Amino acid sequence: MKHGYSSRVIKLNQAADVTSIGVKLGRMCIEYDVPVTTIAEKLGVTRQTIYNWFCATHKPSTKQSTAIEELLLDFT
C-alpha cells in the first residue's frame, strides 16, 4: 500500500539541510514510504510535528533526536 507524500512535502524536504535529523527522517520515510502516523506514534508526537521536522521548519529536542537516530538505524 502506498502512503504517499505530497509533492510540496517532498520538495521542501529535498530543499532542506540534510544535516538536520528531522530532514534525514523525512528522506527515509519518503524513500521507504513509511506512514507519518507510524512515526508520530513511535515518537509520541503529532503528524504535524513530524512534517515540521521533515521540512526543517522546526527541530526535534535532544531526546527526540536520540529516538529518531534509533529509528534511522532500523532502516540502514
Image (cartoon, rainbow, N blue to C red):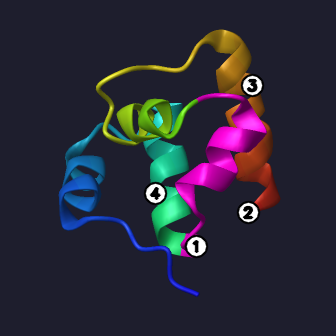
Q: Quadrant of the N terminus?
A: bottom right
Name the residue carrying label 2: 75
Q: Are marks 2 and 1 in contact (CB under 8 Å)?
A: yes
In the image: residue 8, left or right of residue 43 = left
In the image: residue 16, left or right of residue 45 = left
* Residue 52: x %, y % from top left: 37, 32
Q: Judge whether 3 appears above or below 10 on screen.
A: below
Kindly identify the residue that appears in the image at 54 percent across and 53 percent down. Answer: 36
Assign a secondary structure to mark 3.
helix
Assign a secondary structure to mark 4.
helix
Spatial CA distance of label 1 from label 3 is 20 Å
Assess disc 4: are there few (<14), some (14-19) or many (≥20) residues with their C-alpha within 10 Å of its C-alpha. Answer: some
Residue type at numbered disc 2: Phe
Name the residue carrying label 3: 66
Q: Of discs 2 and 1, which sits in the foreground?
A: 1
Residue type at numbered disc 3: Thr
In terms of sequence position, does the residue under pointer 3 or pointer 2 come before the other? 3
Name the residue carrying label 4: 27
Spatial CA distance of label 3 from label 4 is 17 Å
Q: Residue furthest top?
A: 62
In terms of sequence position, does the residue under pointer 2 or pointer 1 come before the other? 1
Q: Are marks 3 and 2 in contact (CB under 8 Å)?
A: no
Spatial CA distance of label 1 from label 4 is 8 Å
* Residue 22: x %, y % from top left: 49, 35
Spatial CA distance of label 2 from label 4 is 11 Å
**Residue 71 in view, yes or no:** yes
Toward which corner of the image does residue 60 lie, by quadrant?
top right
Assign a secondary structure to mark 1.
helix
Kindly identify the residue that appears in the image at 27 percent across and 54 percent down. Answer: 9
- In magenta, the rendered stretch is 32-45
Kindly identify the residue that appears in the image at 60 percent across and 51 percent down. Answer: 37
Name the residue carrying label 1: 32
